[in-house]
Every structure is written in structure tokens, then in C-alpha cells.
Image (cartoon, grey):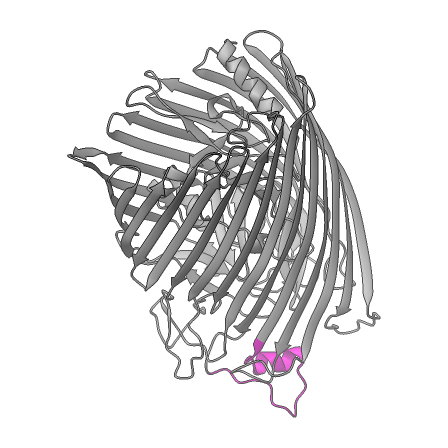
């Protein structure tokens, strides 16, 4: 191994390259070639080309060029990822593994981090996507070096660290159709050993969908968001201590999701709905974190992190999604039969997540052939939930006659570590492990009772699970330009408790992945080609459904998946291009009888209210092909440069549940975007953009029935266009 690569490995394991820790950054390339990307996906800094993981890494500048402004856009720039928004939540699945449920007792299979802080629930992962330094999408189980265990992968979002001896401000304003206004302001004030950076965003937009009801009280799909983030950095006089303090507040106000009801006989226009009930969704919260790194000696460094998070969702939904359905009359009971006869209703919910996180790492800090890291992780949280349904009203919530009031207390503790040993200059061996202890105590204060149920409230259940997971790998470095690797890894997702007291707990989910890949740079670093193939053995898959109108998580099935990914990036002078491809063949490995939300019934050979899932059926959220490509060319024009860019993304069809039907199918789609950028140097940039250039009408998400509202269809954004101006003052 060359001295350069060994030095990079030392930085990777030591975590002491503190100029920009936690940020993917670009080192200057050969003339007209690609920049080198440095990443810290696993708490360590290293060149992307030396990381033996299938990963997509984009700097903040890359995200801007490709028009990525929110979480959902990630699936248009990274292969093998599918993102779906369901009511309050955003579900991320990588290689068909992740989450397809929203419950306070469940965990995501794809771990999501912001500046090293785990965001443990899917309701609040989308509110910090502004003023971004980098985004790292890691495919396959993660967890031998950092944070929480994961079965599907991890996404690391990094924000810019405060810069020493620098004072500057950045303004970024976008205006577009549908009255879109997005403004981002960032300011940095830095001294010799301390600096602060503050960023603020305001974004508002009208809904793509029109509520044509004569009694409409809201326009689902409207957006109004404000968020602010402050980061403070201090560096000790001897350079050995670095302290980062971070705080963030967000307030997102919407008229809830625009859901097209199935079988709409009033309007066939995908962007027209008819709802008379008042709808809203308000998400407010804050995060406070502290991180410190200290070099104990030339050989050992220590890192510690603590984080407090509190976020809540208050929402109200027109449960029948019509302006004609009748509510249950006052002189009748509100049983299930009457709900079928009188489906009109309004539902209201409050979910609060109060989370404490802590992590500590001890890392080797040398340049020898043997490097190591050990650590511990702790999470403790309370999740109170109140779901109320008014079956006697259709315009607004008046009084509940169907209550779900619960509290989940979740705790997770783990110890982890990894060693890297260069047996020769080229041959590197990796061994890592993690042991996790998880516990959940679930208290039902009020839940509906089914026929014959006689449990006494409050009803408390608990489950404790533990698991050993890990990773083994062999890397072979062919000089500075090529890496070959093979690995075997195991991920784990904790079990949990179901809502209904007489429903069994659900078990942990496990994923075993075997992977081989290569990374190479060609033509004097003008062309970068990375590829991988994998096989996944997915056990006890956690699947959500409804039983008797109430949510339940079940895991009677296993799955197998095989696939491949290829990413190509090129830069030759003014010409730049990128290409990403993911192939996935993911199917159930056994047959079983489970419940079906959309079509309750009993299949032959199954117990009452269960339907048959055959071996070989495609796993949910597993598109066979995910493809993205982009091309641009920078043209000098005197004192400025003009860069036209065209990009395309293809997402093949996928199903939202194990039961293929029109109610679960998300058809494949091809989207084209175009941008024209005028760059007047580092201080001024003007951009014109058109997203969904061909005005493709497509289904973005299929929402399934829930205990509070009927399911339906969320359509993706139609053609949108606008102008963006970015100005920097100072620096």
C-alpha cells in the first residue's frame, strides 16, 4: 500500500483530521478532472475510493447541481433506494430493506444521521435538509463503527462546520410556480480558536392538488416551513481538543397530504380531490447536541457525543376523504357495522418523540498497519401517542368516540468495535462486531376493544431482545487507483409490542448480506467507476397491516435478494457526466399466511382473516431497476460561465405490501429535469430550472388504509419551474 493510502487510513481510523470532520469534501483534482471525495461515513475520514462499501456520496455542490432539495429527491440520484411518504412519515428502503410501517414501537431499517446524531424515527428526517455540506448513502447493514444497528443501510447528512478566521454570509433564494418561495440564509463568524455558523430556511408552496369541494376548509398539500440551525466550534490551544455544539429548531405547517381517494366518481383529474373536513399537519421540534474529540496521545483519541431531541406531530384528517359521506347519527352506536354504513369521520392525532442519545468512541491514532476503534451507544426515549376519531362529525373534530392513547418507552444499548489490519502493503483484513440490547415497555391507556375482549386498562406489555451482529471483510489495494473488496455483514432491527393487548409481540428482523465490489479511477482521475454485487438473506421481516381496523406488525416471512450497483462519474474539462444503476431481484423465500390491509379475508389453508403469500412473490418496495444519469457542459462566456444540464431518473414499478393489486402498485416512472446555470464567480450564481420536464403524471405513493383514515394515492409533482439566485458576501 502506498504511503498516501496508509496516511488516509490513519486519518480514517483516528478521527483526528479536524479541519472539516464529518464532512465529505473535495480535494483539488488534476486539471479538468474529478475532485477526490473525502468521507467520514463511519466516524472516520478517508477517500471514498478507499471505503469498501457500496456508497453514493454527494457534496453540497453536487446536490445543488442535481436539484436535490428534499429527502424524496435522493431516490433520483442514488441507485437501489426507494422513498415513500405515508401520512406523517417518510419511509426509506435500500435494496428492498428498511421500513413500511409507522408505529411508536417500530424502528427504521435504514439509519438516518444528521451531523452524527441518529434521528431514530421516520417522522422527523426531512426537516433539516438545507445548508448541506454532504450526503452519504451507504447500502447494506451498518453498525460496527457507529450509532445504531441497521438492516438496510444508513444515510449520513452533514452540515458545514463553522470555519475559523472567516466571516461571510450566503443567501440562496428560489422562486417558482405554485407560488414556491425558498430562502436560505447562512452566516459564519470565525476567530482564531472559535467559530459559529447560523443557517435559516423559509419555504412555502401551494399544493399541486386542488380541493374542489364547495365546503373545503383546507387545501391539502400546502407547505409552510421555517427552521433554524446554529453550530459552534471551539479548538483548544494545543490543537488536541475540538468541541462542537449544535442546536436546531423546526416548525412545519401544512394542510396535510393531498390524497386522491380510490374510485373517485366526482373527478378523474389526479390533482383534484373533494374533502369537507378540516385537515392539517403541524410538526414542531428541536435538537440539541454536543460532540467533543480529544487526542489522548499520539496513538489514541477519544470522541463523545450527546443529543437531546423533542419533536411532535399534531394532525387532523378527513378520514373518509369525501365531502358526501355521512357520519354516524347521534342516536346510534359507533360500532364497526355503523362505521361501514356511515363512513364520514374526522381523525386527530398527536405523537411526541422525546429522545436522549449518547455515544463514546476510543480510536487508534497511529499510522501503523493495525488500526482499531471501539465504542458504546445508548438511546432512551418516550413516545406518547394520542389518536382520536370523531365518527359523528365530518367538517371538524368535535369529540372523540374512538380512542387510542399509549406510551412507548424504548431503550437501546450496544457495544461495538472494528479492527483493520494490513497483512501486506496491499492486503487489508477487517473484522467488526456489535452486541445490542433493546427493551420496550408499551402502556395502553385507552384502546378500542373487539368482540369478546375483556382486558383491563392500563395494559402494560414489554419485550427485551438482544443480538450479536458484525462484519468480516477482505480488501485488496491495487495502488492508489483501484480497490477490490469482499465482505459479509449482518444487521438487526429490534422487536416490539403490538397495540392490541391480545396480539403477540413481533420479533427482531435480521439481514445477512454478502457483497463483492471494486472501485477504480482511470485516465488520470478523469473517470471514476465503482461497482458491487450482493446477496441478501432477510429473516423475520417486519410487516405492518390492519387487523380488526387496528394496526399490527407481523413477521412470518423471510426474503432473499440479489442485485448489483454501478456508478460512473466523468469530468473532461467542461464536460461532466454521471450514471448510476441498481438491479434488484428481491423475493419472499417462504410462504405464509398474514393479514391484508386492503382486502381482508380468509384464503384456503389460512386461519381466519389471514391471506396467503406464496414463496417467490416480490418483496415490498423493491423496484427491479433504479437508474439515474446526468450530463452537463460548462461554456466560458467572458466574465462568467454558462452550464446547461440535463438529467434523467428511472424507478421501476414496486408494490407497497406483499399483496399485489391496483391499491398497492406504484408504477414505474421516468423523470427528466433541466437546469441552466450562470456562474459569475464564487459570489453570484443564477439558475433556471425545470423539474419533470415532460409533465409526467405518476403515482409517488400508495397510502394504505389505517385506523384513522382511508387509503389513497399521492401523485408526484407535475412540471415545476423557477429561478434561483445565490449570493455570497465575504470570504
Q: Residue furthest left?
A: 638
Q: Compare residues 620 and 198 and report the one nearer the observer.
A: 198
Q: Position of residue 523 (x, y in %)?
A: 32, 16
Side of 393 relative to 510 (left or right): left
Q: Is residue 236 visible?
A: yes
User: Which residue is located at x 29 percent, y 20 percent?
Assistant: 31
User: Which residue is located at x 41 percent, y 28 percent?
Assistant: 26
Label the magenta part by its dominant secondary structure.
Answer: loop
Q: Is residue 222 above or below residue 437?
A: below
Q: Is residue 617 visible?
A: no
Q: Residue furthest bottom?
A: 331
Instruction: Give the position of the C terminus as an image quadrant.
Output: top left
Q: Is residue 670 above or below residue 700?
A: above
The reply to whether the magenta stretch includes residue 340 is yes
Range of residues picked out in magenta? 324-346
Q: Is residue 411 above or below residue 571?
A: below
Q: Residue furthest top?
A: 424
The reply to whether the magenta stretch includes residue 443 is no
Q: Position of residue 173 (x, y in %)?
A: 34, 53
Q: Position of residue 312 (x, y in %)?
A: 61, 62
The image quarter containing residue 272 is bottom left
Q: Position of residue 232 (x, y in %)?
A: 56, 42
Side of 391 relative to 477 (left or right): right
Q: Compare residues 467 and 594 and report the one nearer the observer.
A: 467
The image quarter containing residue 101 is bottom right
User: Which residue is located at x 66 percent, y 89 percent?
Assistant: 332
Q: Compare residues 675 and 711 and report the one nearer the observer.
A: 675
Count the marks: 0
Amino acid at each position: 500500500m502506498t504511503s498516501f493510502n496508509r496516511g488516509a487510513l490513519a486519518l480514517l481510523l483516528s478521527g483526528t483530521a479536524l479541519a472539516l470532520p464529518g464532512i465529505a469534501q473535495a480535494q483539488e483534482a488534476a486539471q479538468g478532472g474529478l475532485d477526490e471525495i473525502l468521507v467520514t461515513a463511519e466516524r472516520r475520514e478517508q477517500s471514498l475510493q478507499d471505503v469498501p462499501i457500496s456508497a453514493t456520496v454527494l457534496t453540497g455542490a453536487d446536490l445543488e447541481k442535481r436539484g436535490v432539495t428534499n429527502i424524496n429527491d435522493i431516490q433520483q440520484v442514488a441507485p437501489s433506494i426507494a422513498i415513500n411518504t405515508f401520512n406523517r412519515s417518510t419511509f426509506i428502503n435500500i435494496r428492498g430493506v428498511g421500513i413500511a410501517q409507522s408505529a411508536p414501537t417500530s424502528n427504521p431499517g435504514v439509519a438516518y444521521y444528521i451531523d452524527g446524531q441518529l434521528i431514530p424515527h421516520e417522522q422527523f428526517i426531512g426537516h433539516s435538509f438545507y445548508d448541506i455540506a454532504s450526503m452519504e448513502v451507504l447500502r447494506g447493514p451498518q453498525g460496527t463503527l457507529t450509532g445504531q444497528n441497521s438492516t438496510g443501510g444508513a444515510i449520513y447528512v452533514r452540515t458545514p462546520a463553522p470555519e475559523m478566521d472567516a466571516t461571510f454570509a450566503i443567501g440562496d433564494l428560489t422562486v417558482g410556480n405554485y407560488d414556491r418561495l425558498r430562502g436560505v440564509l447562512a452566516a459564519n463568524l470565525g476567530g482564531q480558536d472559535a467559530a459559529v455558523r447560523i443557517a435559516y430556511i423559509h419555504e412555502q408552496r401551494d399544493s399541486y392538488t386542488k380541493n374542489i369541494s364547495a365546503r373545503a376548509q383546507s387545501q391539502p398539500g400546502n407547505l409552510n416551513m421555517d427552521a433554524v440551525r446554529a453550530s459552534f466550534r471551539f479548538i483548544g490551544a494545543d490543537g488536541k481538543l475540538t468541541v462542537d455544539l449544535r442546536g436546531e429548531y423546526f416548525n412545519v405547517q401544512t394542510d396535510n397530504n393531498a390524497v386522491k381517494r380510490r374510485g373517485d366518481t366526482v373527478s378523474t383529474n389526479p390533482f383534484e380531490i373533494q374533502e369537507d373536513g378540516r385537515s392539517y399537519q403541524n410538526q414542531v421540534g428541536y435538537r440539541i447536541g454536543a460532540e467533543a474529540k480529544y487526542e489522548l496521545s499520539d496513538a489514541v483519541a477519544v470522541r463523545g457525543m450527546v443529543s437531546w431531541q423533542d419533536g411532535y406531530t399534531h394532525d387532523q384528517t378527513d378520514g373518509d376523504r369525501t365531502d358526501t359521506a355521512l357520519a354516524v347519527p347521534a342516536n346510534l352506536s359507533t360500532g364497526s357495522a355503523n362505521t361501514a354504513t356511515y363512513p364520514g369521520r374526522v381523525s386527530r392525532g398527536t405523537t411526541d418523540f422525546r429522545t436522549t442519545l449518547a455515544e463514546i468512541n476510543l480510536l487508534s491514532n497511529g499510522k501503523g498497519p493495525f488500526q482499531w476503534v471501539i465504542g458504546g451507544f445508548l438511546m432512551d426515549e418516550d413516545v406518547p401517542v394520542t389518536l382520536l376519531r370523531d365518527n359523528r362529525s365530518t367538517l371538524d373534530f368535535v369529540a372523540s368516540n374512538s380512542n387510542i392513547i399509549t406510551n412507548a418507552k424504548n431503550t437501546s444499548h450496544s457495544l461495538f468495535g472494528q479492527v483493520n489490519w494490513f497483512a501486506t502493503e496491499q492486503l487489508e483484513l477487517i473484522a467488526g462486531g456489535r452486541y445490542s440490547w433493546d427493551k420496550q415497555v408499551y402502556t395502553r391507556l385507552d384502546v378500542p376493544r373487539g368482540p369478546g375482549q375483556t382486558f383491563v386498562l392500563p395494559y402494560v406489555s414489554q419485550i427485551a431482545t438482544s443480538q450479536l451482529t458484525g462484519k468480516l471483510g477482505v480488501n485488496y489495494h491495487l495502488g492508489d487507483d483501484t480497490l477490490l473488496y469482499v465482505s459479509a455483514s449482518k444487521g438487526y432491527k429490534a422487536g416490539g409490542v403490538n397495540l392490541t393487548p391480545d396480539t403477540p409481540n413481533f420479533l427482531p428482523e435480521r439481514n445477512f448480506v454478502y457483497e463483492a465490489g471494486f472501485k477504480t479511477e482511470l485516465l488520470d482521475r478523469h473517470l471514476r467507476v465503482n461497482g458491487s454485487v450482493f446477496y441478501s438473506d432477510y429473516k423475520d421481516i417486519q410487516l405492518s397491516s390492519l387487523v380488526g381496523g387496528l394496526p399490527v406488525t407481523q413477521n412470518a416471512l423471510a426474503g432473499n435478494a440479489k442485485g448489483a450497483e454501478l456508478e460512473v462519474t466523468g469530468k473532461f474539462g467542461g464536460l461532466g457526466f454521471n450514471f448510476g444503476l441498481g438491479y434488484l431481484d428481491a423475493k419472499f423465500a417462504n410462504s405464509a399466511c398474514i393479514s391484508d390491509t386492503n382486502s381482508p379475508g380468509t384464503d384456503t389453508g389460512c386461519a381466519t382473516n389471514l391471506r396467503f403469500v406464496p414463496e417467490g412473490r416480490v418483496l415490498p418496495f423493491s423496484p427491479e431497476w433504479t437508474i439515474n444519469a446526468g450530463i452537463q457542459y460548462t461554456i466560458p462566456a467572458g466574465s462568467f460561465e454558462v452550464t446547461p444540464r440535463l438529467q434523467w431518473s428511472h424507478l421501476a414499478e414496486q408494490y407497497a405490501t406483499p399483496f399485489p393489486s391496483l391499491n398497492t402498485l406504484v408504477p414505474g416512472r421516468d423523470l427528466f429535469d433541466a437546469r441552466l446555470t450562470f456562474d459569475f464567480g464564487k459570489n453570484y450564481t443564477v439558475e433556471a430550472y425545470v423539474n419533470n420536464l415532460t409533465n409526467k403524471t405518476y403515482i409517488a405513493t400508495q397510502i394504505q388504509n389505517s385506523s384513522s383514515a382511508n387509503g389513497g394515492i399521492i401523485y408526484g409533482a407535475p412540471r415545476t419551474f423557477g429561478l434561483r439566485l445565490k449570493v455570497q458576501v465575504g470570504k
